[in-house]
Image (cartoon, helix red, strand yellow):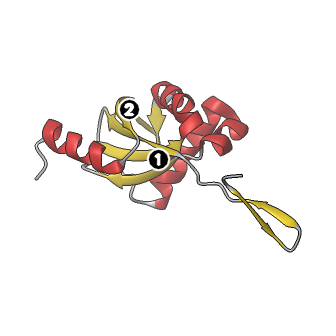
Amino acid sequence: MAGWHCQDSVTILIARRKSRYLLVEASREVDLGSKEGQRSLAEGIAKVIGEFGYMNSGPKVMRQINDRVFVMRTSRGGEGHIILALSFIKQLNGRELGFCTIRSSGSVRKLEELAGKIYKIA
């Protein structure tokens, strides 16, 4: 069977994690390069979808494109949960703001190209 590997009579499942990437825009400047900013975003997402939903979705900020736009990775099944959670977050680090998901894709490269076109990034 594909994906199965037998070694010393122990069967090990080798699985590759499938990911989706989200291009997200904030309504104002947000610093997700710092640990505090990422922790604050993670807490906001977990408040909406709970710890179990957060762990299943596995969100992670991959790259901050400019002061308001970033790319986030999530599991393929958790994409909808993260989009929902981001739309419900109204405050981050004590500052009022909102998030809007621009696009989702299977590759970071496509989203970076799209962001370059939309936001005129060289």
x and y percent of residue 120 in the render? 10, 43
Q: Residues within 10 Å of mark 1 (few under 14, many from 20)?
A: many
- Kind of residue indicated by mark 2: Leu
The location of residue 26, given as percent across then percent down, is 33, 36
**Separation of residues labelled 2 and 1 (CA atoms):** 21 Å
Q: Quadrant of residue 118?
A: top left
The residue positioned farthest toward the front in the image shown: 1
Q: Residue at x 49, y 56 (%)?
A: 36
Q: Earlier in the sequence, mark 2 or mark 1?
A: 1
User: Where in the figure is residue 122, as x and y percent of width and height?
Assistant: 10, 53
Left or right of residue 32, residue 46 in this image: right
Identify the residue at the far bottom of this view: 8
Judge depth for marks 2 and 1 and give the one in front.
1
As drawn, the label of residue 73 is 1
Question: In this image, 18 relative to 23: left or right?
Answer: right
For the point 67% across and 36% down, the residue is 53
Residue for badge 2:
97
